[in-house]
Image: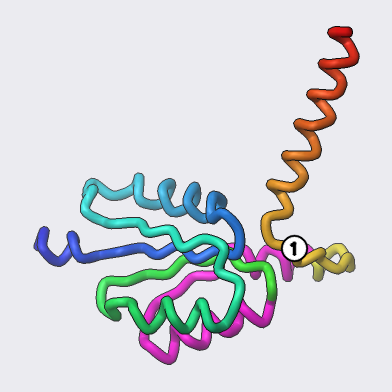
Amino acid sequence: MDDIISKSTVYIISDSTGETAQNVVHAALGQFDSNDIQVKLLAHIESKKDITGIISQLNKEKVFIVYTIVKPELRLFLKEESKKHYIVSFDLLGPMIENIERISGIKPKLEAGIIRKIDKEYFKRIEAMEFAVKY
């Protein structure tokens, strides 16, 4: 049984850093006593060619793909490629974006890594304020 578990891998595919998916995957893995499930991060995936290359290299058994991709066409492509190759996949971000758009009527920006950009801008402002207070 341990041999079967040791071959299990969760692949995180993201068009940004993959940090969001990593946090959720590790929270889910915390519910299991086994440390034998591997997590592999594939970050900054930005094209159908990237996705095709990844899918073609995966061992089809004991694989689960979790993805955070903001562009709808790439999300759909990954979903279709996964199904075509009998790989279970889970879109972590897409349904949230779609439902927030639905209830708010606001179009999403669909920019990968936008939260990191916001964080950088925030910290630059804090540094500027600290500098101003200091001098």
Q: Residue 96: where, in percent of width, then height? A: 67, 63
Q: So how many labels did they put on this image?
A: 1
Question: Does residue 97 belong to the magenta stretch?
Answer: yes
Residue 55 vertical placement versus 67 (above, below): below
Residue 5 vertical placement versus 20 (above, below): below
66 or 40: nearer the viewer = 40
Magenta stretch bounds:
72-100
Q: Callout 1: 10 Å neighbours few (<14), some, many (20+)?
A: few
Q: Answer with left or right where residue 17 lies relative to residue 64.
A: right
Q: Which residue was labeled with disc 1?
A: 111
Q: Residue 130: where, in percent of width, then height? A: 82, 16
Q: Quadrant of residue 37?
A: bottom left
Q: Quadrant of residue 108?
A: bottom right
Secondary structure mainly formed by the magenta segment: helix
Q: Residue 85: where, in percent of width, then height? A: 38, 88
Residue 127 vertical placement versus 12 (above, below): above
**Residue in the image at 15% along x and 66% along y:** 4
* Amino acid bearing label 1: Glu
**Residue in the image at 69% along x and 73% along y:** 71
Q: Which residue is at the far top?
A: 135
